[in-house]
Amino acid sequence: MNVGIIGCGKIAQIRHIPEYTDNANAKIAGYYDFNYERAQELAEKYGGKAYTTIDELLENPELDAVSVCVANNAHAEISIKALRAGKHVLCEKPMAVTPGDCIAMTEEAEKSQKLLMIGQNQRFAKAHVKAKRLVAEGVIGDVITFKTTFGHKGPETWSIDAGSNSWFFDKKRAAMGAMADLGVHKTDLIQYLLNSRIVETTAKVITLDKKDSAGQLIGVDDNAICIYRMENGAVGTMTASWTYYGEEDNSTILYGTKGIMKIYDNPQYSITVITADGERILYDIDKIQTNENQTKSGIIDEFVSAITEKRNSAVDAGDVLNAMKAVFASVESSEKQTTVKIN
């Protein structure tokens, strides 16, 4: 399977390119980046050709699929263009920056009969897969409440153009901040774990601390705190933050009628189940990825295998759409200072 990389920044270099290289059924054939020298360097290192335009890359008839790893505001336009060119698409999260764009992407994928997959890699973390199974088996009974958190010190050192002028802080290119960067992961995850959709949100999506090079608060949110109500009746909080300066928090805690499940809350054990009578069941499965400790995400292997096996992926765009609706509804809730229902 011949793959093209569109956008050769940090996420492409740390995750997409190494994971394609590690997959026996994939070969990287092309690279595009607005910085042509960057694309050229990667082509020389991993093999393949650097292209000067996206259109030129997409015109290659031998190219089967592309990874879209550009800034948020370009996700929809480039993904739709690639689908129309007959390519399968793996688009980084967030899916797009407006509800209309998200819907247009899913419609184009359906029309083209090509796979459109979104990089919601938390579904593939081994402890999350195990936790979903345990919840379905009723180990902690029915989930009543939950809290899910993703917080770290911010994207300044993660972006390929590090520092306070990172594109992550640019309202025009990023549209949203911590909510789109981190909140979308946990919003998607809670629906996955509980096998239930978010139907209502009450949120604060705000900028509290991050400053640009001029010392002014950045134009996007650095914190998002949402109260979600699920279709199955469970209620809980989702917190996304770029201001956790001490250590990263990537935990989820589920409170059920028969006990509690803590996921990635303990550095030693990836899952802790505490039954109603106080018994502790510990699962040592894996360690969650952090910005400083990147491990194989599973997202590329899923993309490649879904294409070669001609099946739907675990994170098809249509399946991610409701999580994106919850993200947009949370922004609306914060702006209007009211609870917003999600259709």
Image (cartoon, rainbow, N blue to C red):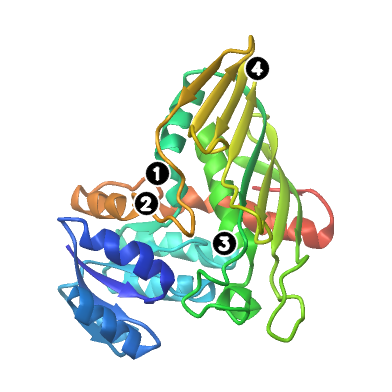
Q: Nearer the viewer, residue 328 or 179?
A: 179
Q: Is residue 102 left or right of residue 68?
A: right
Separation of residues labelled 4 and 3 (CA atoms): 32 Å
Mark before the other along the chain sequence, 2 or 4? 4
Residue 89 visible, this orientation: no
Residue at the spot of label 1: 124
Numbered circle sitting on residue 181: 3
Separation of residues labelled 2 and 1 (CA atoms): 7 Å
Tag 3: amino acid: Asp
Task: Tell me: residue 88, above or below residue 323.
Answer: below
Q: Is residue 218 left or right of residue 89?
A: right
Q: Are marks 2 and 1 in contact (CB under 8 Å)?
A: yes
Separation of residues labelled 2 and 4 (CA atoms): 32 Å
The residue at the point 59 percent across, 38 percent down is 252
Quarter of the image containing the N terminus? bottom left
Q: Are marks 2 and 4 in contact (CB under 8 Å)?
A: no
The residue at the point 37 percent across, 45 percent down is 314
Q: In terms of secondary structure, where does tag 2 sit? A: loop
Q: In terms of secondary structure, where does tag 4 sit? A: loop
- Asked which quadrant contains residue 33, the reply is bottom left
Q: How many marks?
A: 4
The residue at the point 63 percent across, 46 percent down is 149
Residue at the spot of label 2: 297
User: Where is residue 207 drawn, in percent x and y?
Assistant: 76, 66
Tag 1: amino acid: Phe
Q: Is residue 118 left or right of residue 18?
A: right
